[in-house]
Amino acid sequence: MRLHLGHQTLAAAVIVVLLAGCGGGVSPARLGATGASTAAQLRFMGSAGAAHPFQSAGANATRSWMAPDAKKSKTLLYVADQGTNDVDVYSYPAGKLKGTLTGFQTPSGVCSNKAGDVFILNGNGMTVEVYAHGGSSPIRTLDLPGYPELNCSVDPTTGNLALGVLAGSCGDCFVVFAGGSGTPTTYTPSGQDGLPGCGYDDKGNLFCDAYGTGGFALFELPKGSSTVSAVAVSGASGLTAASIQWDGTDLAFGSGAGPTLYQIQLSGSTGSVVGSTSLSGAAAVWQFWITNNLGSKKHKGLRVIAPTISGSAGIAGYWNYPAGGTATKTITGLDEPDGAALSTKK
């Protein structure tokens, strides 16, 4: 259930916080030993090699495939698996495999727009690959000025795409692609050392959390504005910036890439941490997806979809939101799943 918090604590048995140059990070035991981590994850874990990430064995040479009926499916679930360099596509909510997209360089974050187009971050590359709903080849490639951070987000009012960038020509910044295409506009707020998560609310305001000089930091780019402003957040002491997403009423973020999501309630130029959602059985959650990402403010029947490691196996689990608790369904057969998103075709 959603808990109203006084002091926040992170379970040491689940994550290890490293007080390194980025202001904090985690080292999940299995992921940290693989060498397949993305540039953003290495930075998050405090690795000095983050600007020059370990390159995985290479893209999967197998050709992408998609079931003939995939394009006709109203909703598909895309799960990025950095362990295989693939993105697996499932029916939703049934979780039946419908296709596999290949050729990525440690794929990480995933997001989608109202048309059902899917944006996939090349975690150890400098591109975003865009696929049509149910498509087996990219419809366009977006070039980034650096390495992509943990997640991306699409403005439901304009179709703009936003995400954080690491070690780029703009430094540690976030970028906005107008209409989800073309060349991005870059923003480099002062007082931060990396912006791992960016999320639009339902009105088109963009929020990016950051490794701040004093701990957790949050920045806003209001709709229609070109000026980034800081949002003071109370109750965030001890928490770490990570993947972030609008849940219909609040901003949800996964501090420390751990199994707990925290909610920030916004009020003008300030915010406060008002609750948490525990994903029982999950380990590292680099990027999650809440099912009303582009939808209503009603929480009834919502799910959070989180790729993670459970025991020694990679899974994508469904948890009730904001209640949390035990996963109501798990998709197995994954290696090191990193991010997930739903694509819904009108």
Image: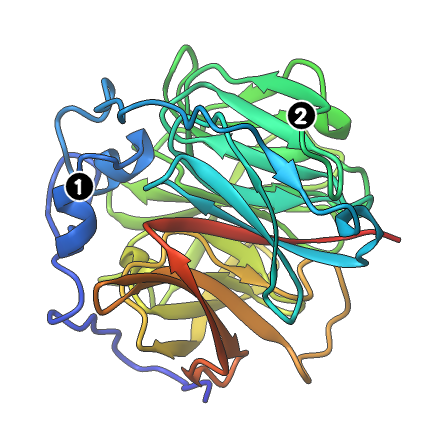
Q: Quadrant of residue 295?
A: bottom right
- Specify whether residue 32 is in view: yes
Q: Quadrant of residue 300?
A: bottom right
User: Is 262 left or right of 167, judged from the image as shown?
Assistant: right
The residue shown at (28%, 63%) is 313
The residue shown at (25%, 41%) is 44
Nearer to us in this view, 59 or 303: 59
> Whole-percent x and y of residue 38?
31, 33
Q: Which labelled disc corresponds to residue 138?
A: 2
Q: Judge whether 187 appears above or below 243 on screen.
A: above
Q: Which residue is mark 1?
A: 34
In the rendered image, the quadrant that contains the N terminus is bottom left
Q: CA distance from mark 2 to mark 1?
A: 28 Å
The amino acid beneath tag 2 is: Pro
Q: Quick one: which residue is furthest to the top in this view?
A: 169
User: Is 69 left or right of 11, judged from the image as shown?
Assistant: right
